[in-house]
Amino acid sequence: MTDDRPFGALARDGLTHVELTWVEKKLEHWIRFGRIAEDRILTRRTRVVGFRPGAIFAFVRWASNDFGTIVSRIDVVRAVAANEPYTTLPFVRPGGDILLKIEGWPKVSQVLAVIDAVEAAGVDPCEAAPDHWRHVHQRITAGHQPRLYTTERHTAWLKRREIEG
């Protein structure tokens, strides 16, 4: 399905939109995890995905030139509702609550390994506690290994979320 509307025109539906681009070995923007509520193809190389308020997703950006990688970044973001404050982020409209922001391939690969570990624990990463992604950000930024996200931590998060309503 192709949509002729410009990227900015998509933001009126209450979703957080992320522009994804794929130019093999040059520019690659993709979603590592998250529940996509809407997916619109703009061109052969560009599409826009939408996330409902409260949804958590990981957005990976990578770019290279003739000399190698020039951008390597991952952001874990919580989509916001219309009345919530947010932080702007390139290719994300309007923006979101940034839970994790990591740059540089060695650190990005650490985050990808953490995501794999969450999945290995039997938890969908978009269901993991937002505080876990903040913890991962802080630990990796400080050069430390983040704690594992266990099923016990996840159960505690689900109970806390239930109590907070």
Image (cartoon, helix red, strand yellow):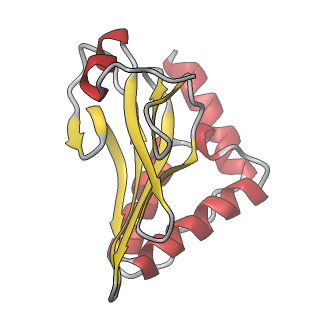
Question: Nearest the camera: 31 or 34?
Answer: 31
Please report the residue visible at 72 percent of the width from the left and 49 percent of the height from the top: 152
Q: Quadrant of residue 161?
A: top right
Q: Quadrant of residue 121?
A: bottom right
Question: Nearest the camera: 74 or 2?
Answer: 2
Where is the N terminus found, in terms of image quarters? Answer: top right
- Residue 57, horizontal then vertical, whole percent: 50, 41
Measured along the vertical axis of the image, is residue 88 above or below residue 82? below
Total residue callouts: 0
Measured along the vertical axis of the image, is residue 29 above or below residue 163? below
- Residue 165, horizontal then vertical, whole percent: 52, 15
**Horizontal relation, residue 8 to residue 28: left or right:** left
Question: Nearest the camera: 118 or 46?
Answer: 46
Please report the residue visible at 34 percent of the width from the left and 85 percent of the height from the top: 66
Please report the residue visible at 33 percent of the width from the left and 19 percent of the height from the top: 5
- Residue 91, horizontal then vertical, whole percent: 30, 43
**Horizontal relation, residue 106 to residue 155: left or right:** left
- Residue 83, horizontal then vertical, whole percent: 24, 14
The extreme top residue here reads: 13
Measured along the vertical axis of the image, is residue 80 above or below residue 98? above
Please report the residue visible at 49 percent of the width from the left and 37 percent of the height from the top: 56
Measured along the vertical axis of the image, is residue 10 above or below residue 125? above
Question: Nearest the camera: 47 or 4?
Answer: 4
